[in-house]
Image (spheres, rainbow, N blue to C red):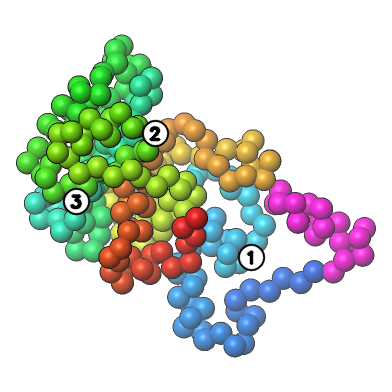
Amino acid sequence: PYHWLKINYLDRENELNLKHWHFTLDDNPNLDPAYVEALKKEYTGLWYKRFIQGLWVQAEGAVYDMWDESKHVVSKVPHPHDCDRLIAGGDYGTSNPTTMQLIGRHGGRWYVLREYYFDSKKAGHQKTDAQYADDVEAWLGDVRDRVTIYLDPAAASFILQLRSRGLHVIEADNAVLDGIQLISRLLADDKLFVHESCIHLRREFASYVWDQKAQQRGEDKPLKKNDHALDAVRYALYTHLQNPPMDEEVRRLFKGVSMV
């Protein structure tokens, strides 16, 4: 609703002697109904209102408004050895928390199996890159050689430390909005679940909100609070799923999502 086109023109149509019409996919007789329904299923929440209903809606409130503890939090998850894919995402901090999230794919669904979380402020001391790397190796245990780790590119020294120990580490793609859209779709499609022990990730899913001040400037930005574990999950899933080879499920998830 703060977009320049709406403010400077559409909201002033009488003053500027303009006329505008609102059309949706359903108004186009040349589109196959099955194609229209398929498009509608590709979006959820904010993006559904904008891209399908064509509404000038504000990014406000909870970022993951489809998050449902009763549905997305589970007490049982597949054993890591039973997963056909194992990935981990990491968000590295010095004064901020450092967290890792281990994610496995089983039966076409993704499960956050366990988390590592160290808050230096609460602990009263910081850790070195080597100490964090020791923690990560112990946390991964006997699956360390099967896991691809996606880390924020800003954590250059930590990436080097992990690579020096033979771990497979890739710099993550930090595309915030596209990554949020993917995570939202996985949740809405019941393709992403979180083990009940991941208490920090669960708290962040429930408390992650849009930045109202940024919205008034015409920007969609989450508030930079309660986001460390969420960033780790987004790094892993977004970067991993946009890399080929992609199966048909992944291609469907990414159809229409900008990779810029």
- Closer-to-camera residue (217/55): 217
**Is there CB contact under 8 Å for labels 3 and 2?**
no
Q: Residue at label 3?
A: 86
Residue 16 place in picture, x, y as percent: 91, 60
Q: Secondary structure at mark 3?
A: strand
Q: CA distance from mark 1 to mark 2?
A: 36 Å
Q: Earlier in the sequence, mark 3 or mark 2?
A: 3
Q: Is residue 11 magenta?
A: yes
Q: Which mark is nearer the camera, 3 or 1?
A: 3
Horizontally, residue 219 falls left or right of residue 105, namely right
Q: Secondary structure at mark 1?
A: loop
Which residue is located at x 48 percent, y 66 percent? 256
Residue 109 place in picture, x, y as percent: 25, 59
The residue lying furthest to the left in this view is 142
* Residue 228 in sight from this viewpoint: no
Q: Residue at label 2?
A: 154
- Range of the magenta residues? 1-19
Residue 99 vertical placement versus 105 (above, below):
above
The amino acid type of the residue labelled 2 equals: Ala
Determine the image quadrant of residue 154: top left
Q: Secondary structure at mark 2?
A: loop
Q: Is residue 57 magenta?
A: no
Which residue is located at x 43 percent, y 68 percent? 255
Q: Residues within 10 Å of mark 3 (few under 14, many from 20)?
A: many
The residue lying furthest to the top in this view is 124
Residue 30 place in picture, x, y as percent: 59, 88
